[in-house]
Amino acid sequence: MLVGILGGVGPAAGVLLHQTLLQHTASGGVDQGHLSVCHLSCSADIANRIVFLQAVETEEQEQRQRNGQLLPLQSSGSGSEADRSVVRGVENPAVGMARTFELLRALRTPVVVGVPCVTFHAAPIWREFRRRIETQQPDEEASSSSSKSSVRCINMLDETARLLAQVAPRCCKVGVMATTGTRHTRVFHDLLEPLGYEVLEVSAQTQAELQDTIENPQWGIKSTAPATSPRCVANFKGYARQLVARGAVVLVLGCTEIPFAFGGATTFDGVPLLDPLVALARALIREANPLRLKPLETPPL
């Protein structure tokens, strides 16, 4: 079975996922022991996730005002009625990613795929992406149905929750560092709170700085990855310390470029770092060939 990486969100995260696949594959020390991987990165064809989610938030707020309701923004578990291809002139990133996915489907081979971006898993984007890739294209031949049914898409968030249960089965307070879009759509709250975890985040003021540390055009991690600037590394370590001081027992690196700032470490000041890319990589290996999955090495709590 082929492993598909739908990258470009951001490009460095796709490269890191590919590297993580190699690290968790029991290859026997030979090239032939690795899985077949197709990594597609079409960044220019995929709309900005944050801008799209801001457009969704604005539209929902205006809708509530028209209805005379003062309710909070819909969480990532809300119904599908808010999902659409374009919102306030901004294309859903799912549309471009679905176009990338069709390049994989054209290979006509069994494939298991993952998207190495947490914000892309926010419900308004992820649900539309799944709807599009699961819909039979009208011009496909009937013989393609077997190929279509062989495509399997892994949800990185579900696998993150699975990995958390393995790494920290007795944990109750989880610190999360993530983009503003992920935070506003309550991606990790909706994922972890039903499982009994308390999600801790930095303050609203600090969140603005955290977002800048991700996307600052001069020194932000998206601009420099896989390299990191000293300012970027110092900031993320500072955010981690704030969350640990508030009682976080595990720290989730809730944006897939953040692991670059920690240099591949699995702990910080004695607290386990949970990387969703590790969760996704291990799931992809498990689904493609479970015999190739290395045992999980977990730091003690």
Image (tube, grey):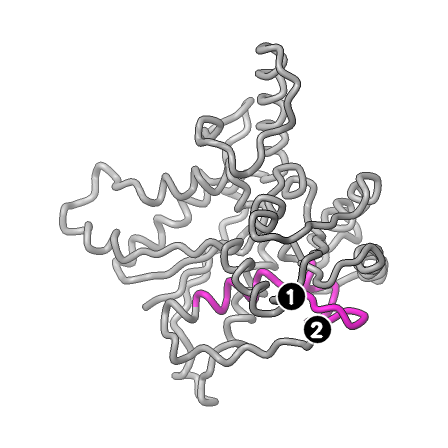
- The three-letter amino acid code for the residue at tag 2 is Leu
Q: Given the current orientation, which residue lies at the most extreme left position?
A: 142
In the rendered structure, does residue 187 fall within the stretch colored magenta? no
Q: Position of residue 195 (x, y in %)?
A: 56, 52
For image coordinates 63% across by 67% down, the residue present is 168
Q: Position of residue 254 (x, y in %)?
A: 65, 54
Q: Position of residue 59 (x, y in %)?
A: 58, 21
- What residue did someone put label 2 on? 301
Q: CA distance from mark 2 to mark 1?
A: 9 Å
Q: Tell whether 37 sits left or right of 21.
A: left
Q: Nearer the viewer, residue 219 or 119?
A: 119
Circle 2 — which element? loop
- What residue did someone put label 1 on? 170
Q: Given the current orientation, which residue lies at the most extreme bottom position?
A: 29
For image coordinates 58% across by 40% down, the residue present is 49
In the rendered structure, does residue 270 fall within the stretch colored magenta? yes
Q: Nearer the viewer, residue 145 or 242?
A: 242
**Magenta stretch bounds:** 258-284
- The three-letter amino acid code for the residue at tag 1 is Arg
Q: Quadrant of residue 113?
A: bottom left
